[in-house]
Amino acid sequence: MRRTGVAVIGCGAISKLHFDSIVNTPDTELIYAVDINEKRAKDAASAYGCGFHTDYREVLNDPAVHAVHLCTPHYLHCQMALDAMEKGKHVLTEKPMAISPEDAERMIRKSEETGLTLGVCFQNRYNATSVKIREALDSGRAGSILGAKASVTWNRDEGYYKADSWRGTWEMEGGGVLINQAIHTLDLLQWFAGDAVSVRGSCFKSLLENVIEVEDSAQAIIKFDSGVNALFQATNCYCVNSPVSIEIICTNATINLDGSLTIRYNDGKTECFTDDNPITGEKSYWGYSHKLLIQDFYDCIHTGRKFTLDGHEGIKALKIVKAIYKSSDTGQWVTLS
Ligand SMILES: NC(=O)c1ccc[n+]([C@@H]2O[C@H](COP(=O)([O-])OP(=O)(O)OC[C@H]3O[C@@H](n4cnc5c(N)ncnc54)[C@H](O)[C@@H]3O)[C@@H](O)[C@H]2O)c1
């Protein structure tokens, strides 16, 4: 089988997990580390034994590169993905896939026109606890969902925002805690509860009001097409990065993820699953399921199987985020298209 040549674009904080995963994925070959910051590109290239470049467009002209990973600031994902697919490369983009649903739709259209795989890095769907929740719901054992709530209480301080100029801005980050940190949990919620149909939410700045343009905290009620309503809360102003908490009340069970997963069935049976890496905002956590997602992405490319976490899936949480922003601005319910 032809080995798939890969370039990682953006050699910042998250890139190490992509590099580590690529070099441990069968039939893939890391070709380039790319960053406008030459030192970062060179350092990654020497750590992982590949070439380096500072201009991603040059890399897209290399026929040895068949796929690119986008580990760059949010506002760059759309243009980079379009350029890459135009040049015949598969794309795995970090979340959020874009800073607007319109841009995300352009990426989806390009992927459909070209037949290239467009994947979105919502790695928490691959966590053992997420898979167990889906099993309990899909098998019918938990019954149907009556309601849900989720909260993300993490810590991102002034130092975090001041370290990189793109963070904390509408133009480059596209929002605050919702689009960057809580989007993972919104993705899980809708993966469990069904497609979101409308939201009512409010966003605000609190402890970081003199540091960032965007929201540091938000709350919302989300209505899903299954008839389920969920309460959602997120902040970057907590003192630590607590495990994400998700509770799902079902007709036959209560599902509780809070570091570990407990499913209490109404007949008295209880199942517990510990996750070695609960969903927190710690950097040590990020890598837990990247490797699983990346190996699945390449297995799909190599076998022709469809990669499930494609643009159509990746856009869903982004649409919820943008709907909460709109609802916060207008003070009205916002219907998702
Ligand atoms: N899935 C997760 O759990 C997770 C965790 C952290 C970050 N992320 C995502 O990863 C992405 C990157 O985040 P980060 O924290 O690594 O950011 P970062 O700022 O640490 O790194 C971004 C890198 O991109 C480089 N860059 C900027 N413009 C470029 C260009 N035109 N060409 C090439 N390189 C360019 C920068 O020099 C920088 O090294 C974001 O989308 C973020 O949301 C995902």
Image: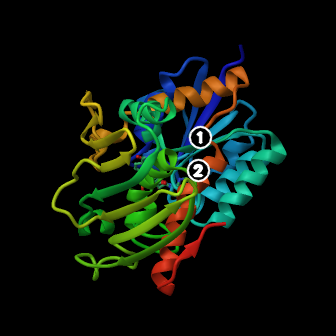
Which of 258 and 119 lies nearest the eye of the viewer?
258
Question: Which image quarter: residue 160?
Answer: bottom left
91 sits left or right of 74 in the view: right
Q: Which residue is mark 1?
A: 309
What x and y, as percent, mark residue 80? 65, 54
Question: Which quarter of the figure has residue 198?
Answer: bottom right
Residue 113 at x, y percent in the picture: 84, 47
* N-terminal-most mark, 1 or 2: 1
Label 2 belongs to which residue? 314
Q: Nearer the viewer, residue 80 or 113?
A: 113
CA gap between label 1 and label 2 equals 6 Å
The quarter of the rendered structure image containing the C terminus is: bottom right
Is the C-beta separation of discs 1 and 2 under 8 Å? yes
Query: Where does residue 266 sit, x and y in percent of width and height?
Result: 30, 36
Crowd rating for badge 1 (residues with CA inside 10 Å; few <14, some 14–19, many 20+): many
| Quadrant (top left/top right/bottom left/bottom right) for the N terminus | top right
Q: Amino acid at mark 2?
A: Gly
Residue 285 relative to residue 111: left or right: left
Amino acid carrying mark 1 in the image: Leu
Mark 2 neighbour density, 10 Å: few (under 14) some (14–19) many (20 or more): many
Q: Regarding mark 2 in the picture, which secondary structure is present there?
A: helix
Q: What residue is at 44 percent from the left and 51 percent from the top?
A: 189
Quarter of the image holding residue 328? bottom left
Q: In x, y percent, where is residue 4?
A: 66, 25
Which dot marks residue 317?
A: none
Residue in the picture at 30% in, 40% down = 285
Nearest the eye: 136 or 290: 136
| Residue 46 seen | no
Q: Which residue is the extreme one toward the bottom? A: 330
Q: Is mark 2 within 8 Å of ligand 1?
A: no
Report helix, strand or loop for mark 1.
loop
**Label total for image:** 2
